[in-house]
Image: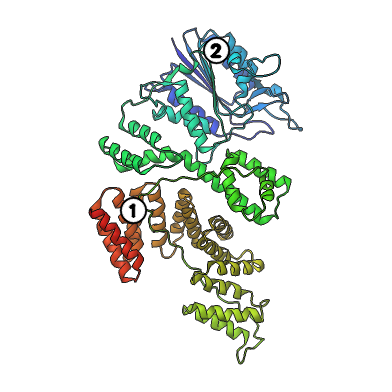
Amino acid sequence: MDKIALLIGVTDYGSGLNALPSAIKDVEAVKRVLQHPDMGGFDEVKPLINPDPLTMQEAIQALFLDRCTKDDLVLLFFSGHGIKDERGKLYFATHITRKNSQGELVKATAVPASFVQEIMSDSRSKRQVVILDCCFSGAFAEGWSAKDDGSVNIQAQLGGEGRAVLTSSTSTQYSFEQKGLELSTYTHYFVEGIETGAADSDGDGEILVEDVHEYAKKKVQEAAPAMKPEIYAIKEGYKILIAKPPHPGDPKLRYRQEVERCIHHGKISDISRRTLNELRDWLQLSIEEATTIEDEVLKPHRIYLDKLVRYEQTLVETIQREHLPLNGETRDELKHFQRVLGLRDVDIDPIEARIVTPLPARNRKLLIGAGIATAVILMIIVWPKPPRPPVSPPPENKSPPTDIPTSSPISTMTVKELYDRGLDKSNKKDYQGAIEDFDQVLRLDPNNYVIAYYQRGSARHKVEDYKGAMEDYTQYLKFNPNDVDANSSRCGAYNGLNKYDLAVADCSKAIKIAPQDPISYFKRGYAYDAQGKYELAISDDTKAIELNYNPLSLPYNNRGNAYSQQSNHQKAIADFNKAIQIDPDYAPAYYNRGNSYSYLGQKQKAIQDFQKAADLYQKQGDTKDYQDALERIKKLQK
């Protein structure tokens, strides 16, 4: 009784088809787990890369007919393009597969799925597994047979004893590679389920076909909810033993299985967090080991959140460029982008509802051709008490242009003198006086003193009149749309108004114009943090640090906040340490580090940090935060 596998990966194609570089990596990864004596334990695993149609057909025939007996387990894996012709028939692409000038498949260059089905039906093997990571892979099962009325009966079609077909998508879906993964999406989680042992959900030391498929399906749909991997099997097909967990009883596997059980929609509840902490200590795992496992389990959800961010950014930028309602071509492009991201209408409806709220309901619906459905709450890993919010800096004053005219006197003062006085007051932190002077300048000569809109916006920003500041920046940007400082400053005003999607759009534009501007990265990181998009916040804060944002204590503190929200407290503490090293009087860093120590059960260190934060807040006249820090100490001392 042998276990034999053929792994086909096609990366290069003829005209009309995109390359798929991940296909080779898919084959290598599947080969690794199937050949491993402690996992798949297969006797023979043959990789076949970029074959032509004849070579591919001969290899498939050899696998199912020439090499196997009835007791053998035979496995076929295919990663590449799946293509349907005009009649809906599925073909597997080879390295010479191409489309003609009309975009139609040249069928002679590909292998029809029907060929594979016929070979499998003639095989003596009673245990057959087919894994298809390609577009329209669900159509493979539909091709076995059909009733006279043309409907599809999956059970009747599959036929045979102990046959299982695992597909990455339905018969009508595309399969897309995911940003952040080296392998194709389904294959990545198929391999992960075996390699980590996580697919052995019942802990019986066996990974059946249904076990690994259900694990992969769950993870795929966390990252790309619209993708629907399927499994088609009859009799014992579901129960075919495909692998074993590499290290049964491993403490890391036990912890991972508990994390999988505890996390729901990217959230760990307070009770589950306590459960995991107790289990971590009992299993004698370090905090770093536990955090690494949690990050791996959470990765699909973070990929999903990143897709929501990319869709939101695209939608905001599209609205800024075009008038509503959007035309049909633009709506189709947005719908296709949504499909590529693997998002459902229910995933993007909350984004649409938030961004297009001012529009009438009819126009909102016209935006992308989908109605507004029930909102989806994007859950995050909870924190026992939210850390101090990240710090967003005020805008800087712009230097006035050198060619401002000096006409239109007020009493003995010219408009230029009024402008200069307003700028001087702003520099001396007399912001209200500066606003009054810029008011007069704009009443007298707004055309020649457009810069006064920016300066008044800056002064309003510093007295926390975010709405007024936003309106002034907007007026200035009508004349100077590519001004980096103005886009970045309006980003900060939107942050103050809690309009984080618009803040992200403005700072993204500023970054596109000036990619080495640390301020824009810092402000956009603040917006991402406020939205709960911590991976993106960490990325922007890291970039601000690399570009030497001044003062550096701020991005270190903000990045520490994001890490703490992900329960990555060791990295959070390291960032708070850095912020304190840079600025020993920076109270928020002490407060936040105290929160992290408290969370890790290190009470004395937490109390010391809260006391230091309280002393600094009191010295700085911040009564509210002083009292807050004292309350934290009281709770820890109970």
The image position of residue 65, as x and y in percent, is 56, 9
Whether residue 608 appears in this view of the structure is: yes
Whether 281 is drawn above or below 228: the answer is below
Q: Quadrant of residue 175?
A: top right
Identify the colour scheme used: rainbow
The image position of residue 618, as x and y in percent, is 31, 69
Viewer-proximal residue, 388 or 33?
A: 388
Q: Residue furthest bottom?
A: 412
- Please tell me how crowded label 2 is: few (under 14), some (14-19), or many (20+) other residues with Cα within 10 Å: many
Q: Residue furthest right?
A: 102
Q: Which disc, if any, is residue 574?
A: 1
Whether 275 is drawn above or below 472: the answer is above
Could you tell whether 617 is left or right of 85 in the image? left
Asked which secondary structure carries label 2, the reply is helix
Measured in 3D between alpha carbons, the distance from the residue under mark 1 to the one under mark 2, in whole angstroms, is 56 Å
Q: Amino acid at mark 2?
A: Phe
Q: Quadrant of residue 195?
A: top left
Q: Which residue is mark 2?
A: 64
Q: Quadrant of residue 485?
A: bottom right
Q: Amino acid at mark 1?
A: Ala
The image position of residue 15, as x and y in percent, is 69, 33
The image position of residue 415, as x and y in percent, is 62, 84
